[in-house]
Amino acid sequence: MSAAPIGVLVMAYGGPSSLDEVGGYLADIRAGRPTPRRVAELVRERYRKIGGRSPLREISERQAAALEERLGRGSFRCFAGMRHWAPWIEEVVGSMSEAGVERAVGIVLAPHYSAMNTERYFAKVAEGLDLYRARTEFVFVESYHDSPELIEVLASRLRDGLARFEAGEPVHVVFSAHSLPARTLAEGDPYDGQLKETARLVASRAGLSDADWSWAYQSAGQSSEPWLGPDLREHLGELASRGVRRVVSLPVGFVADHVEVLYDIDVEARARAAELGMRLVRPDSLNLDPRFIEALARAVLARARRAGWLPEAGGT
């Protein structure tokens, strides 16, 4: 086995660092197609309400640094790349090659696999290898949705959220994740099943009964085709009609603060809950929690072992 460090490419969606970058960011997402002015202004307003920028790049880079520390500097080198903004995945792949990385594990900062989402990150790696004529050998972590470390840290966050209410108050938990077009179900994509498995495992770990929690999707796109549901805001209305007045919102599909959490839940969903006479709380995102970093480390180590780059066994 080579003594050279194993590379790790930690990948996230990306986001604008200022309001001035919103137009370019949307152009990247839309592959250069013009963005309707109404949509651009809507997105810009959302970023304005969360501080005028996305914190995702900074958090992702700090997660990559923490992962490198956990895995062992000298044995692993971790890099962070964004799918839709700088540092672009393709460019980071080129930098890894220039740094002499011969073997690398790619992992997306989204625990659940979807061909419509996860595979697009892997395609960006392939584009980078082609663009820079890089010879780095990549293997990928496809999902880690049932990682014991992930389940434990999410259950801990859930307990934190429940603790914000008075003891004995009835509280309902709503798990959520980013919606995708509904056709993914007909295509047999595992995304929906993996998400709901995570929710069931977290609920069980936190001691919830089936009646104590439910599922919703959020942050659906602007296209006219049907998207996976129920939509979080609509689901809150349905819960309110059943007499629910206290809600913990736990977005298990997201592992860091960004617009889908800081705006879609903290601003939009919370405002809808207030309209309905409900109190909604959201526990802190996973961000740099050591237990989440451990989940990433375990997934990377397992994939490197499967590739034959590390000896089988435990302990690391």
Image (cartoon, grey):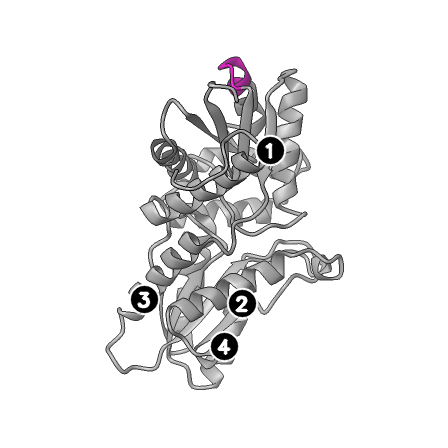
- Name the amino acid type tagged 1: Val
Q: Is residue 271 visible in this depiction of the protein?
A: no
Instruction: Work out whether mark 2 precedes mark 3 in sequence or the reverse, and give the earlier one.
Output: 3
Instruction: Work out whether mark 2 precedes mark 1 in sequence or the reverse, and give the earlier one.
Output: 1
- Name the amino acid type tagged 4: Gly
Labels 2 and 3 touching (C-beta < 8 A): no
| Percent of width and height locating residue 226 | 70, 62
- Name the amino acid type tagged 3: Arg
| Percent of width and height locating residue 196 | 55, 65
Check the picture and name the quadrant holding the C terminus.
Answer: top left
What range of the chain is rendered magenta? 95-101
Q: Measure the C-alpha gap from mark 4 to mark 2.
A: 12 Å
Q: Measure the C-alpha gap from mark 1 to mark 4.
A: 44 Å
| Percent of width and height locating residue 72 | 36, 29
Labels 1 and 4 touching (C-beta < 8 A): no
Instruction: Work out whether mark 1 precedes mark 3 in sequence or the reverse, and give the earlier one.
Output: 1
Residue that mark 1 sits on: 139
Say which quarter of the image contains residue 183: bottom right
